[in-house]
Amino acid sequence: MNRIEKILKDYPFIIIDGGFATELEKKGFNLNDRLWSAKIIAQAPGAIRDVHMSYLIAGADCIISSSYQATVPGFISAGYSGKEAVELIAMSVKIADETIKLFHELSPDMNNRPDPFMAASAGCYGAYLADGSEYRGDYHLDIEGYKNFHRERVDILAEAGAGIIAFETFPSMEEAAAVAELMDDYNGIQYWIAFTVRDSVSTSQGDDFRECMRLLRGRKNLAAAGINCSSPEFITPILDSLEPEFKKNFIVYPNSGEHFHTGCSCWEDDHDANDFYRLAGEWYGKGARLIGGCCRTGPSDIAKIKMFRDKTVTVPRCS
């Protein structure tokens, strides 16, 4: 039984953290760079630790490492050596693990929550392109091309001690299929795949979302599957459209509902922040079992999800 299954035996759902780059930008970091938040691994690792800690304090059960846009070719293109690139990717895992250890030392009261854990982020190939294509899906590699791209980082993350890989913002079924095939070779590593969607039916590339869930059903070592960094308005209709067998360990961590413009690599603040207390209840009731936030969400949103779990759902027992 994997870590996620064990927690879900005792808790109604798992709380994922929120936006990472969003919190770094609040601290004054300029992330308008092809490495995005990954550049802070080298520049200010203490800031990464502080963001992780803020989400643990807010109530997150799972923090996601800062390796979303961290790849060896990406770091090399930014002037780092291959050796430095490997070390920085591995450092993202070390920082997250050390933050969890520190949190335990500072927070002995673990009532109504499981022991926190870390998932190592691995963005889609479009994230490496750094042009916003994870929200469009307008790129293509063959199966071996996708597997080779992802294998290098998975090997580094696994060697650094990651037991769960979070494959995030996947716009297409073809890349997900390649990763699922790749991960069949990693017996000791669990993973999840989270897609971006453009509406309540289709992924960002236009694939039928239900077919994506069908593709992943029963895959070896797959711990969860679902949606991230997409508008919250699409989550409930998608959950309503899925058969129960496709909602096993369904993960949702959408953005705030604001719109990302790839031309300027910026967010348009044309939506009020969504009420994650209400949405957590709605999505949990529809079958989601891992719930959090992505871009433009923060610790206050995660605290609302924790509040829903504490006040509305009975937790059988503590870890």
Image (cartoon, rainbow, N blue to C red):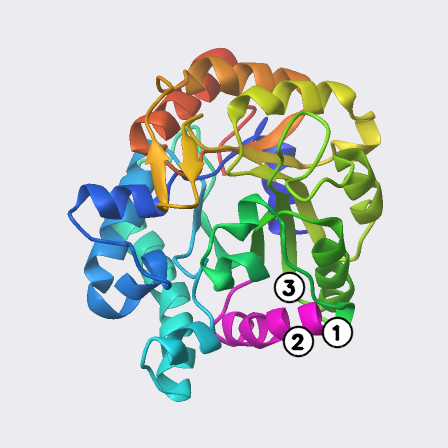
Which contiguous range is marked in magenta? 145-163
Residue type at mark 1 is Glu
Label 3 element class: loop
Against 223, is 120 above or below?
below
**Residue 19 counted in the magenta span:** no
- Residue that carries the numbered disc 3 in the rendered image: 189
Residue type at mark 2 is Asn
- Residue that carries the numbered disc 1 in the rendered image: 144
- Judge depth for marks 2 and 3 and give the one in front: 2
Which of the labelled discs sits on residue 250, or is there none?
Answer: none
Q: Which residue is more in the foreground, 175 or 107?
A: 175
CB under 8 Å between callouts 1 and 2?
yes
Residue type at mark 3 is Ile
Few, some or many C-alpha atoms within 10 Å of disc 1 (few <14, some 14-19, many ≥20)?
few
CB under 8 Å between callouts 3 and 1?
no
- Judge depth for marks 3 and 1 and give the one in front: 1
Q: Is residue 90 left or right of residue 107?
A: right
Measure the alpha-carbon separation of dots 1 and 2: 6 Å
Q: Position of residue 50 (x, y in %)?
A: 23, 50
Q: Position of residue 244 (x, y in %)?
A: 81, 26
Label 1 element class: helix
Which of the labelled discs sits on residue 148, or is there none?
Answer: 2
Q: Which residue is more in the foreground, 97 or 155?
A: 155
